[in-house]
Every structure is written in structure tokens, then in C-alpha cells.
Image (cartoon, helix red, strand yellow):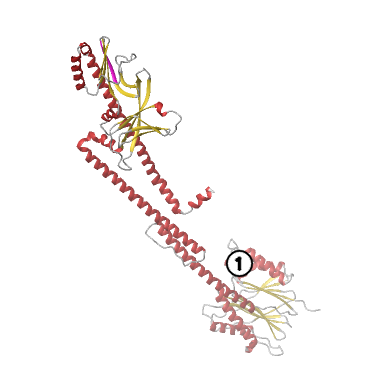
């Protein structure tokens, strides 16, 4: 579930960038702010504690000095009369108004004032004692001195007023024994009210005043000027000789401590504070500008990515007209421009594909129409076996073959090859087929009479076909043509070869080539052709083919050539013509290396049947 929530929350690039900005920008600032806050708390608290410690040490030293001075005059004070003693005591009180004394000499003890908190000098106290002293829950700064048989204990009360005097009124100090903080109450709390200077400890819902606090100080003036407290461990001797562990809790505000810290600068403190404030404001301004700039960059990136995502969704849904908006001059804008270019090309490619499909559909129709131009079934002659095939290199072919029966005895066997490929060659081929059928059926000297005794002239037929092709096709279009007439009674084959490859005649295991008797048809307006005659014998195999057979190339660039075709025909002369055509076409398929570059392949086979015995 957490993983799913993580993926859902961070799926968008914007959320990832915001989280990255937060981790790289905000988190370090928060950590630095936390470190500065805690560090300043420690430094300022330690500084305040050191001030209190130095003030107490200073008072201890002063009390020690006072004790030594009084010890020297202790015998005189003790030996004097009451009036004189009171006069001397008044002088001492004026010199050290906050100091209280206990003097012992010649077995006599004198206290100053008479109702002082301490009435005796503890027996355990050594001559050079100095430090903090506790008696009946109250704390004192005390020092002792000895001069011959005179002992002096000088002490000052460490109450709220005295503590305020130690810190010049900008810090509040409360003294708490550790024993008060120990016990079963986990909510024991020490408080110092800065506004009134009152200090107390609350335990089990009951408040008890503490020693210290002092005069009221200025409370915090807002969030930056927070109150802070620090603990100062202090060792205290009790009047009964025990060592006590107490804590001096120092409480103040940041403003008061800073003013105390920079007070040494005197008049220069204000300019320094102003400079620091200007630097702080400058850094804050830089941070605000950086943060604003980063937010703007993040928004620019996420908006561009989101718009690209929306564009891909639109294109995926089939809306190829949708385009990603272009904003700015950055890499993301170039990416959006590249996407729009890609969408344009896809849209154009789809249009091209549709146009190509349309053209292919039309070519398929043209192919079907052209197939109708080829003979659906070759004539079944009593003395001649016929078979033919045309394999277009594309949808339509520029090759043409036909077998047309004329009268009772004659059959026209024709094979042509139009220059070029594709639909243009196919149209010329259709023109040639229409002209041939028109000449054979309606042309004046190109067909036999009713009795079939008068043979047609292949030369005359070829001349008329050339004239019609020349008149009805572009000048660069022409065709090679092998036009022949077979006599069923005599077995003679009359033919005219107009620039076509010579057919192959397989007779008794040998190949007898035919001759070319003229130029291609449709190239010249007038050209005279010749007719030649060959007598077909029983078993003769005649192969008429286009240049797509002999000029087929293998991977090495070698052509199939007429010699290989002749070898195949010689090896399989006795096979049925349909099987023989399949053998030849299979060899050609295996021979051709690049089928897409091959020419139209057309092959017509004719074999003389033996005479009926």
C-alpha cells in the first residue's frame, strides 16, 4: 500500500521536482535554521551562565578580601567597649553594607548585625574557606579568615535581590537543590516569571517559592526574542559540613543577552547591528528570489512535460491534429517542436499510406483486368500441345502472350515485351493486345479465308501492329514481338521476330535457335518485316520467352542466360508442359537474388504431338 501511495504521489514530474526542490532547498534551510536555533540556544545559555559564574566568583573574591581585612582588626573590635564596638561596627557596615559577619576572639562571638542568619562559625570550616554556604534552605556567599586567635566569617545573602545585582538586572537566577527535582513526580517544573522576577517549583500541583529570581526584567517581545534557560551546576557546603549539589537556573531573553554581548562595542553596537540586519535581509531577499525563481522553473518544466504528455495521449487516441504549444526558447520547447514535426510527418505518412492503399486497390483492379487479357485457356490442338505463364514483377505486367485460333487450320501464337515496367507498360500491353485481336479478326490480309486455305502473313500483321502502336502510344514506348502462325495440317510455323529474343527449339536433344528478322514494333512509323517458316517435327519443343527469364541475376550478378534454360528444357523434354514450366519457374525463383529488381517473366511452351497412326 505504501509503495502504491508512493508511486501515485510521485508519478507526476511536477511532484517529483517539487519534492526534489524541497529536499535540496527547503530541508537544508530548515536544518540550518534548526542548527542555528539550537546552537544559539547553547551559546547564549552558556554565555549567560558564564556571566553568572563570573559574578558569583567575583563576589566570593570580594567577600574573601573583606574577611581578611576584618580578621586583622578583629581583636581590637572584640576588646573595645560597647559604645566603641558599635561605632566600629557602624564603620564596617558603611564600608561593606551587604556583608554580614561572625567574629570569634578570646572566647567572645560577635555577629553583625546582631540578628544575623549565622550565629556561629562552623567547627568544620577551615581558615581559608570561601564559596557558597547553605543554612536552613538559604544560600550565602561566604569566606573565612584567621588572624592569630581571631576568626572571622564574612557572608552575603544570595537572595533574589543579590542575584539581580550580580547580573545587572538582565538575567533571573533561581537556585534549586537537586533533591527537589528527584522523586516520583515526573511533572516537577521550575518556573521563573520574568515579568515579576518570582521563581517557584511546582510539584504534585503545589507551588513552592525558590531562592532567587530577583527584580522583574523585560519579558520576550515576540517569537525571535524567546526566553531561554540554562543550568549552572554549583557546589554548596551546608553549615553542618555536608556538600550539596544544587543548580542555578539562569533565565533571560535573547534580546537582553545580545545587548549584554554587544555592550562592549559601545556606540559602534548600533552600526554593527544595522549592518548585520542589512546582511540578514539581503540573504533573505536572495533566498526569496531563488525560491521564486526555482518555483517558476519547476512550473515551466512541469507544464511543458504535462503538455507533451497530453499531446501524446491525444495522438495515441487518434487526434493527429493536436499540437503541443510552444513556449519560450529552451530544450523543452525544441522537444515540443520536434513532437509537432513528428505528428505532422505521421499525419502525412498516414495520408500517404491511404493514398498508397488507394493506388494499390486500383492496381489490383488493373491486375484483374489484365488477367482477363491473357488467354483463360490455351487452344487444345490435335497436333500441338501448348502451355504458358506470365509472372509480373509488380501488380501488372508489361509482357504479353496469346494464342488465338483462326479458322479451321491456323492458330496465332504471340509473345511481346513492352519497354519499361508497371502501369505504363501494362497500358501499352493492353493496346497491343487490342490491336492484335482487331487485326486477326477484322484486318484485311491478316486472316485466312472461310475455307482456311489462304495463310495469313505474319510480316504484314506485324507491320500493322507497329503502325498502330506508333500512332497510339508515346514515342518512348515500344515493344519486342514474336508473332507466329501454326498450320495444323502441315505442322509449319510461320513467324516474324520483331526485335524479340530468339525462341529455342529443342529437337532430338539439340537446341536450334531462331533468327531475329526486324526491329521492335512501335518505334518507327513505317517498317517492313519478313516472314520465316520452320517445319515442326514430332517431339519438337518450342520455347518462347521474355528477357525476364534469361536476364535474371543471382547474388554474384550472373544472368540465367539462354544456355541454362536450354539445358533445363533438354533434361525434361518429355515431361508434361505444365510440370516443365513449374521446373523452369522454380529454378528462376531460386536463382534470383533480389526479387524486387527482377523483370516480368513470361514463358510459352509448344510441343509437336506425334501424328496419329
Above or below for 386 versus 199: below
Q: In the image shown, does 141 or 448 lie closer to the viewer? A: 141
Tell me the SS state at disc 1.
loop
**In this picture, which residue range is highlighted in magenta?**
142-147
Which residue is the site of mark 1?
Answer: 552
**Res 462 → quadrant:** bottom right
The magenta stretch spans residue 346: no
Counting from the top left corner in percent of width and height, residue 500 is at 60, 75
Counting from the top left corner in percent of width and height, residue 556 is at 58, 61
Above or below for 597 versus 214: below
Above or below for 68 versus 612: above
Q: Would residue 520 be seen by someone viewing this image from the given angle? A: no
Counting from the top left corner in percent of width and height, residue 409 is at 72, 84
Q: In the image shown, does 559 or 516 lie closer to the viewer? A: 559
Q: Residue at x 46, y 66 (%)?
A: 322
Q: In the image shown, does 434 or 30 lie closer to the viewer? A: 30
Q: Is residue 104 left or right of residue 8?
A: left
Q: Would residue 224 be seen by someone viewing this image from the given angle? A: yes
**Res 93 → quadrant:** top left
Q: Is residue 425 left or right of residue 403?
A: left
Task: Tell how many labels.
Answer: 1
Q: In the image shown, does 404 or 59 lie closer to the viewer? A: 59
Residue farthest to the right?
A: 613
Counting from the top left corner in percent of width and height, residue 240 is at 36, 17
The magenta stretch spans residue 145: yes
In the rendered image, the quadrant that contains the C terminus is: bottom right
Amino acid at each position: 500500500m505504501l509503495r502504491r501511495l508512493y508511486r501515485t504521489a510521485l508519478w507526476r514530474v511536477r511532484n517529483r521536482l517539487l519534492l526534489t526542490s524541497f529536499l535540496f532547498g527547503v530541508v537544508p534551510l530548515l536544518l540550518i535554521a534548526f542548527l542555528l536555533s539550537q546552537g544559539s540556544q547553547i551559546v547564549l545559555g552558556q554565555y549567560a551562565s558564564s556571566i553568572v559564574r563570573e559574578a558569583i566568583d567575583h563576589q566570593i573574591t570580594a567577600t574573601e578580601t573583606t574577611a581578611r581585612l576584618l580578621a586583622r582588626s578583629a581583636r581590637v573590635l572584640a576588646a573595645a567597649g560597647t559604645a566603641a564596638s558599635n561605632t566600629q561596627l557602624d564603620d564596617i557596615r558603611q564600608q561593606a553594607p551587604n556583608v554580614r559577619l561572625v567574629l570569634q576572639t578570646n572566647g567572645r562571638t560577635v555577629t553583625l548585625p546582631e540578628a544575623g542568619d549565622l550565629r556561629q562559625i562552623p567547627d568544620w570550616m577551615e581558615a581559608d574557606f570561601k564559596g557558597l554556604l547553605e543554612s536552613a534552605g538559604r544560600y550565602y556567599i561566604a569566606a573565612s579568615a584567621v588572624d592569630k586567635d581571631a576568626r572571622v566569617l564574612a557572608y552575603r545573602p544570595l537572595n533574589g535581590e543579590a542575584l539581580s545585582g550580580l547580573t545587572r538586572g538582565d538575567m533571573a537566577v533561581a537556585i534549586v537543590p537537586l533533591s527537589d527535582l528527584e522523586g516520583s513526580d515526573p511533572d516537577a517544573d521550575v518556573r521563573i516569571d520574568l515579568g515579576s522576577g518570582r521563581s517557584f517549583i511546582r510539584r504534585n500541583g503545589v507551588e513552592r517559592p525558590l531562592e532567587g529570581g530577583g527584580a522583574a526584567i523585560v519579558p520576550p517581545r515576540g517569537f525571535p526574542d524567546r526566553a531561554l534557560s540554562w543550568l549552572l551546576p554549583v557546589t554548596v557546603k551546608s553549615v553542618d559540613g555536608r556538600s550539596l549539589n544544587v543548580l542555578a537556573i539562569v533565565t533571560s531573553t535573547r534580546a537582553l543577552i545580545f545587548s549584554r554581548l554587544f555592550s562592549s562595542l559601545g556606540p559602534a553596537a548600533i552600526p554593527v547591528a544595522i549592518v548585520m540586519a542589512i546582511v540578514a535581509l539581503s540573504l533573505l531577499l536572495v533566498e526569496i528570489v531563488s525560491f521564486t525563481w526555482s518555483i517558476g522553473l519547476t512550473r515551466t518544466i512541469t507544464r511543458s512535460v504535462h503538455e507533451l504528455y497530453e499531446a501524446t495521449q491525444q495522438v495515441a487516441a487518434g487526434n493527429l491534429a493536436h499540437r503541443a504549444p510552444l513556449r519560450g526558447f529552451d530544450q523543452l520547447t525544441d522537444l515540443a517542436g520536434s513532437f509537432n514535426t513528428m505528428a505532422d510527418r505521421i499525419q502525412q505518412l498516414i495520408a500517404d499510406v491511404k493514398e498508397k492503399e488507394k493506388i494499390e486497390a486500383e492496381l489490383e483492379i488493373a491486375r484483374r483486368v489484365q488477367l482477363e487479357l491473357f488467354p483463360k485457356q490455351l487452344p487444345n490442338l490435335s497436333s500441338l500441345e501448348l502451355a504458358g505463364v506470365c509472372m509480373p514483377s509488380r501488380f501488372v505486367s508489361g509482357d504479353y502472350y496469346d494464342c488465338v485460333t483462326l479458322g479451321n487450320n491456323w492458330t496465332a501464337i504471340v509473345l511481346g515485351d513492352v519497354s519499361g515496367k508497371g502501369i505504363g507498360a501494362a497500358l501499352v500491353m493492353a493496346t497491343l493486345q487490342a490491336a492484335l485481336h482487331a487485326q486477326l479478326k477484322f484486318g484485311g490480309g491478316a486472316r485466312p479465308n472461310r475455307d482456311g486455305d489462304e495463310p495469313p502473313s505474319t510480316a504484314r500483321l506485324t507491320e500493322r501492329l507497329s503502325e498502330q502502336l506508333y500512332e497510339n502510344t508515346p514515342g518512348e514506348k515500344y515493344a519486342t514481338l514474336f508473332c507466329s502462325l501454326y498450320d495444323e495440317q502441315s505442322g509449319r510455323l510461320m513467324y516474324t521476330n520483331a526485335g524479340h529474343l530468339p525462341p529455342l527449339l529443342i529437337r532430338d536433344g539439340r537446341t536450334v535457335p531462331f533468327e531475329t528478322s526486324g526491329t521492335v514494333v512501335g518505334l518507327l512509323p513505317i517498317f517492313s518485316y519478313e516472314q520465316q517458316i520452320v517445319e515442326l517435327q514430332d517431339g519438337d519443343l518450342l520455347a518462347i520467352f521474355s528477357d525476364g527469364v534469361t536476364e535474371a541475376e543471382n547474388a554474384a550478378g550472373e544472368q540465367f542466360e539462354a544456355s541454362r534454360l536450354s539445358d533445363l528444357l533438354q533434361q525434361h523434354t518429355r515431361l508434361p508442359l505444365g510440370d516443365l514450366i513449374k521446373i523452369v519457374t522454380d529454378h528462376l525463383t531460386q536463382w534470383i537474388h533480389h526479387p524486387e529488381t527482377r523483370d516480368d517473366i513470361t514463358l510459352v511452351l509448344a510441343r509437336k504431338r506425334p501424328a496419329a497412326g
